[in-house]
Image: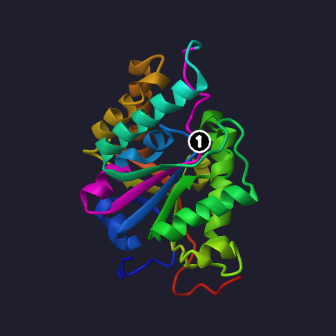
Amino acid sequence: MSTAPQPSTELIGLVSPDELQHRLGLSTVLAFAAHPDDIDFGASATIAALSERGVEVTLCLLTAGDAGGFDPGRTAEQTAELRRREQEEAAAVVGISEVTLLDERDGFVEPSYELIGSIVRQMRRVRPDAVLSFHPERAWDRLQKSHPDHLACGEAVVRACYPAVENPFAYPELAAEGLEPFKIRHLLLMGAPRHLAQTRVDVTGYQQRKIEALGRHFSQHRDAEKMVGFVTEQMRQIHAEGGFAEDFHHVVVNSPETISGF
């Protein structure tokens, strides 16, 4: 993990990828998403910018996304295999180094004890400087951002970040395997309610990488041209100054000033 200076307060406003990397001291990022393509809609341009700067980004999917798509003639198993390949291809576009898959049921994800334990396992294995995932709060400005699996993913990840991953008494079987507790420093939550998305990452120059990654998920786009137009316009609106950006709710989980339990 990096020893660069760590901010004690959240990043606010438009920041460059260089500033994001330096201010958060990023050398490793672990991303969690409910389905294949989620991370590409929410954060793939930011990931492309960070990976180009030497940050190792890994992705953990909670489900195989077997309940998604528009082909009724395809079985759930066929869809799961197809979407796995699509996500691996998209990951290569933006520089994600590893994709792992849990076995949650698509459409019915819950922040259970077992799921939180699986997430803690991944966190303790990777030991990232920051965790990227969904926001656990519903965004009423665009309900599609808040698929129930997205909300459950966000809630499970937040619960794992504090206190489970740093609690030596939580999931003691992991410590017995050599996966020791540690403290997460930063959370970057995508799909946040508009009033909470205070960090905008300037991804100008990386917007086409995002579109290219999304294009790998061909099974999910009934109207690819419309999707591209919508995503591009969203990035323009988030930037608001003539470029392209992605937004997050940045949460400092642990800083030098943090007192555990307060």
Q: Quadrant of residue 259?
A: bottom right
Q: Position of residue 208 (x, y in %)?
A: 28, 36
The residue type indicated by label 1 comes to: Thr
* Residue at image point 53% right, 66% down: 123
Please identify the residue farthest to the front as the structure is shown: 177
Asked if residue 49 lies in the magenta stretch, the reply is yes
Q: Position of residue 220 (x, y in %)?
A: 49, 25
* Residue at image point 52% right, 25% down: 78
Q: Position of residue 87 (x, y in %)?
A: 42, 38
> Magenta region: which residues?
46-71
In front: 6, or 33?
33
Please identify the residue farthest to the top as the structure is shown: 73
Q: Quadrant of residue 141?
A: top right
* Residue 18, above or below 32: below
Instruction: Look at the numbered disc 1 and give the secondary structure of its residue.
Output: loop
**Residue wearing tag 1:** 63
Quadrant containing the N terminus is bottom left
Position of 29 compared to 165: left or right?
left
* Residue at image point 67% right, 39% down: 105
Asked if residue 84 lies in the magenta stretch, the reply is no
* Residue 197, above or below 22: above
Residue 197 visible: no
